[in-house]
Image (spheres, rainbow, N blue to C red):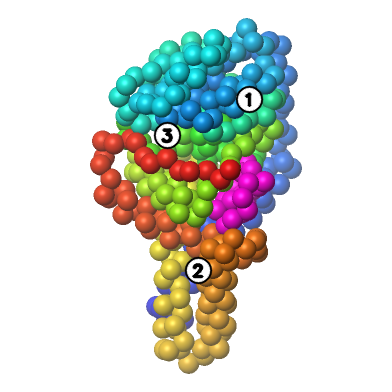
């Protein structure tokens, strides 16, 4: 085997491991763990703790009534339940509409510094031992608070990640279908991660922490939810995953809007890799480092580059290899995948429903946007924690 072949198979292995292999290994490790270790149940609580539902919002006048109705439908003792909105920079009717809800406490500053700055400022007003973060444009199920707080009966739990679900009853374009399928797979991996040791980060749509563990973050932090939750895990706590607590959110209005979101997330991922660089040390963080690198770091760094190098390397192997039939088959399979993705893109422009072809399209779309995210991160003002809001499907 020559050098070119070795490089090709290393890159192919990285791509396979990132998206399929890690899930398989995770599933096997969880099964082995269950043979030797019986999980303790911490879900019985004699008394429910006081909690604060924490909502950061910027110009969310269109969803205030729906969000407050959802908050009031949550099954939790009212005397132990506080609702806090931080609406920094909002210049629409958000604050005016919130005045109609005496059960909501609003903290407002005229200057917009971004979501992380709003969280850093607002957390100082939280007096309850548990704080639950959620977005203004999401609806959470009625039992979510009860389900999440039970995990804190385990003193090792510092954060509880809820499940993100995409409303598939909105306009069925690639943005909705692709994002929905992606989050179903993500939820599967998060559940396995949690069963093995700890979930690797939380989604901002719904997650809870012990208030005392909140760590102030730089205002330009792009993935506040991810960094905050992993900072807690780095303090030797675990991130539990609760799929009985979920946040429903509409998918992006179209793929252009979804691109904005994916590019920002990818840029935030690159930023997070640097800011959480200590977590790359397996000698200090053990299995958490393995999970972090496998589930997150590879996706935001090496894997997209490896993916897009496979075709040109495959062509070179056909040209310079005497036994090229095997490589011809591999190239044909790759080209068919790209063709499927391209046709999936074409169908999305015509609003034609085809979930099978949305898979290669959305997969390629995600990886292209990781590369775009790198350049976005390089160009972005490092002191700016704001971003352009993504329009959601209706």
Residue 168 seen by the camera:
yes
Distance, label 2 to label 1, CA atoms, is: 46 Å
Of the numbered discs 2 and 1, the one sitting upstream in the chain is: 2
The residue segment tinted magenta is 163-186
Where is 81 relative to 39, above or below? above
**Residue at position x 25%, y 42% in the image:** 381
Q: According to the image, label 2 marks what residue?
A: 12
C-alpha separation, residue under disc 3 versus residue under disc 1:
24 Å
Spatial CA distance of label 3 from label 2 is 32 Å
Q: Nearer the viewer, mark 2 or mark 1?
A: 1
Based on the picture, tell me whether residue 327 belongs to the magenta stretch: no
Indicate which label's residue lies in the foreground, 3 or 1.
1
Is there any visible trace of residue 182 in the rendered image?
no
Upstream in the sequence, badge 3 or badge 1?
1
Measuring from the top left, give residue 245's x and y in whole percent: 66, 31
Q: Nearer the viewer, mark 3 or mark 2?
A: 3
Mark 1 residue crowding within 10 angstroms, few (<14) / some (14–19) / many (20+): some
Tag 3 and tag 2, C-beta contact below 8 Å: no
Q: Which residue is mark 3?
A: 224
Residue 353 - label: none
Which dot marks residue 70? 1
| Residue 171 colored in magenta in the image | yes
> Which residue is painted at 52% across and 47% down in the image?
252
Q: Residue at x 54, y 74 (%)?
A: 339
Q: Position of residue 111 (x, y in %)?
A: 30, 24
Residue 151: quarter of image: top right
Q: Residue 124 lies in what quarter of the image?
A: top left
Mark 2–mark 1 CB contact (< 8 Å):
no
Query: Are there few (<14), some (14-19), or many (20+) residues within 10 Å of tag 3?
Result: many
């Amino acid at each position: 085997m020559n050098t070119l072949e070795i490089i090709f198979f290393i890159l192919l292995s990285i791509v396979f491991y990132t998206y399929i292999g890690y899930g398989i290994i995770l599933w096997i490790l969880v099964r082995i763990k269950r043979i030797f270790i019986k999980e303790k149940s911490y879900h019985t609580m004699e008394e429910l703790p006081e909690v604060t539902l924490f909502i950061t919002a910027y110009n969310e006048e269109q969803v205030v009534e729906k969000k407050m109705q959802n908050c009031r439908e949550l099954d939790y003792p009212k005397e132990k339940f506080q609702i806090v909105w931080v609406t920094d920079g909002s210049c629409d009717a958000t604050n005016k509409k919130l005045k109609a809800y005496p059960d909501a406490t609003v903290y407002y500053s005229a200057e917009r510094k971004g979501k992380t700055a709003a969280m850093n400022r607002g957390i100082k007003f939280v007096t309850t031992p548990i704080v639950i973060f959620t977005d203004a444009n999401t609806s959470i199920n009625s039992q979510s608070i009860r389900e999440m707080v039970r995990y804190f009966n385990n003193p090792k739990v510092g954060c509880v990640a809820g499940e993100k679900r995409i409303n598939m009853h909105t306009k069925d374009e690639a943005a909705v279908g692709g994002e929905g399928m992606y989050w179903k797979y993500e939820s599967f991996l998060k559940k396995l991660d949690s069963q093995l040791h700890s979930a690797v980060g939380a989604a901002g749509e719904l997650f809870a922490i012990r208030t005392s563990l909140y760590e102030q973050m730089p205002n330009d932090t792009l993935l506040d939810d991810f960094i905050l939750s992993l900072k807690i895990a780095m303090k030797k706590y675990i991130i539990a995953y609760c799929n009985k607590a979920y946040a429903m959110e509409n998918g992006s209005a179209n793929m252009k809007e979804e691109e904005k979101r994916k590019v920002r997330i990818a840029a935030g991922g690159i930023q997070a890799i640097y800011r959480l660089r200590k977590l790359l040390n397996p000698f200090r963080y053990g299995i958490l480092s393995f999970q972090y690198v496998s589930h997150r770091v590879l996706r935001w760094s090496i894997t997209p580059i490896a993916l897009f190098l496979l075709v040109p390397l495959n062509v070179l192997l056909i040209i310079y290899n005497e036994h090229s039939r095997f490589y011809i088959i591999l190239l044909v399979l790759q080209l068919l995948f790209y063709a499927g993705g391209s046709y999936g893109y074409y169908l999305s422009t015509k609003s034609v429903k085809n979930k099978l072809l949305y898979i290669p399209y959305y997969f390629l779309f995600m990886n292209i946007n990781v590369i775009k995210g790198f350049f976005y991160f390089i160009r972005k003002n490092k002191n700016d924690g704001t971003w352009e809001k993504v329009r959601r499907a209706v």
